[in-house]
Image (tube, helix red, strand yellow):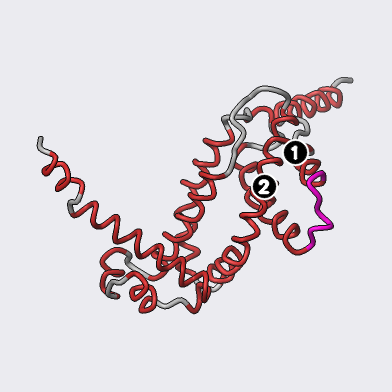
Amino acid sequence: MSSNSIEAKSDGPGARRVRTQERLIKAAREAIGEKGFHRATLDEIAARAGLTKGAIYDNFATKDELFLAVVITWTTERNQRFEWPQSMAGSLKARLRQLAEAVIADAPEAKLEAPMRAEFLLYALTHEEMRKRLAEAWPSRVAKMREHLLKFVREDELSLPLDKFILLLEALVPGLMYIRTQLPDMLSDDSIIAIFESLAGQSSVAVKQARHKVRRRKLTP
């Protein structure tokens, strides 16, 4: 196959569509960064991308679909830069400490993203269609989190089932970063580490065994 045919293949309709979507997502991020989700308009986004408004609807069914693509891109970039622990070595407490240290290391970037995160939360709360799309995207997000977590924790080590542990982290990390951004003196690195280490309580297996022993004692005459 000639180099010209390879170039033509790589520049086919699919590749052009991906590049167009990337341009639109980039333009949408810029507009949202300056004006927020509510005030960013499709006309402005198209103009920033050097495309027509019709090009947006050729690639995204609705404004919310485009905005969700922005959020997914932003979340993907965050996950790629986040230094997830990669080993089962050491105690669970030590491994959760590594996770806390990764959260601390990412805090400066999280602080920069805080306005966009807050703006998106407000947008989602006031747009039912966006909430539906977030619900649809949730299983894939959980699957990705499971993939990362299972590299350094075993589910039977945790005091919660893994999916519930993921919910805990989804609430905990943004909450900690919010407090860190607003009241940095109240949330030191040591405090964040202590909070994560505290998650290494009794495993769900140990809890079940303890409950079973209690039940047996109650049944013993």
Looking at the image, which residue is at 26% across and 73% down? 54
Compared with 89, 117 (above or below) is below
According to the picture, the residue beneath numbered tag 1 turns out to be: 199
Taking the image as shown, residue 219 lies to the left or right of residue 40, namely: right
Mark 1, Cα crowd under 10 Å, few <14 / some 14-19 / many 20+, is: some
Q: Is residue 149 above or below residue 71?
A: above
**Residue 29 drawn at (x, y percent):** 46, 65
Quadrant of the image containing the C terminus? top right
Verify CB contact (< 8 Å) between mark 2 and mark 1.
Answer: yes
Which secondary structure, mark 2? helix
Mostly what secondary structure, the magenta segment?
Answer: helix
| Residue drawn at 75 percent across, 24 percent down | 209
Decide: is 38 above or below 80: below
Please state the horizontal and vertical placement of residue 193, each as a whole percent of the image: 77, 41
Whether 214 is among the magenta residues is no
Q: Residue at image x 50%, y 72%?
A: 37
- Left or right of residue 199, residue 56 in this image: left
Residue beneath the point at 62% across and 50% down:
170
The span picked out in magenta is 183-190
Q: Which mark is residue 121?
A: none
Label 1 amino acid?
Answer: Leu
Could you tell me which secondary element the residue under label 1 belongs to?
loop
The picture places residue 122, in percent across and down from the top left corner, at 58, 70
> Mark 2 — residue?
168
